[in-house]
Image (cartoon, helix red, strand yellow):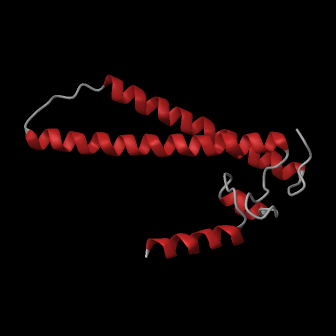
Amino acid sequence: MEKNRCLTPEHIKELKEILEEKRKELIEDIKRGILEEASSEREVGDLVDMSTEEILRTFEMRIRDREAKYLKKIEKALGKIEEGTYGICEECGKCISYERLMLRPVAELCINCKLKQEKIEKKLEK
């Protein structure tokens, strides 16, 4: 593990533990969801029941998709910790504040770059 120029060793240790705990919880949630889906016996009823079932299945798939994306972000953040680049903004190269990382440990942008990104996204939505 390389020395990080943005965070103290104590901060990195604390954030790494948070990321690892979130990863563990997320993997457990994903496993539980898969097991519940596999073990549930769903009866096919009338059209309303089938429609409701399809909506529930779509909702569950969206949740699993979000969990998988978040898990990838966690893995990426843990990889950056090992490389010594964790906490460095991918846009401008400046340090992401410890406070921001405590709120969003998978943050890839400093607050200024994130605000700029959101401003651009709002303009594109119009």
Q: Quadrant of residue 56?
A: top left
Q: What is the x, y in percent for residue 111?
A: 70, 69
Q: What is the x, y in percent for residue 124?
A: 49, 71
Residue 17 appears anywhere in the view: no
Residue that appears at 10% across and 33% down: 45
From the viewer's side, name the closer residue of 21 and 52.
52
29 left or right, relative to 45 = right
Q: What is the x, y in percent for residue 22?
A: 62, 43
98 left or right, relative to 63 = right
> Is 111 above or below relative to 101?
below
Residue that appears at 22% across and 39% down: 53
> Is 32 above or below relative to 19?
above
Image quadrant where one finds the C terminus = bottom left
> Is 35 above or below relative to 3?
above
Residue 31 appears anywhere in the view: yes
Image quadrant where one finds the N terminus = top right
> Is 101 above or below relative to 41?
below
Farthest left residue in view: 46
87 left or right, relative to 8 = left
Q: Quadrant of residue 58?
A: top left
113 left or right, relative to 38 = right
Residue that appears at 33% across and 46% down: 59
Q: What is the x, y in percent for residue 47?
A: 9, 40
From the viewer's side, name the closer residue of 79 and 45.
79
Q: Quadrant of residue 87?
A: bottom right
Please give the count of numbered marks on the rendered protein: 0
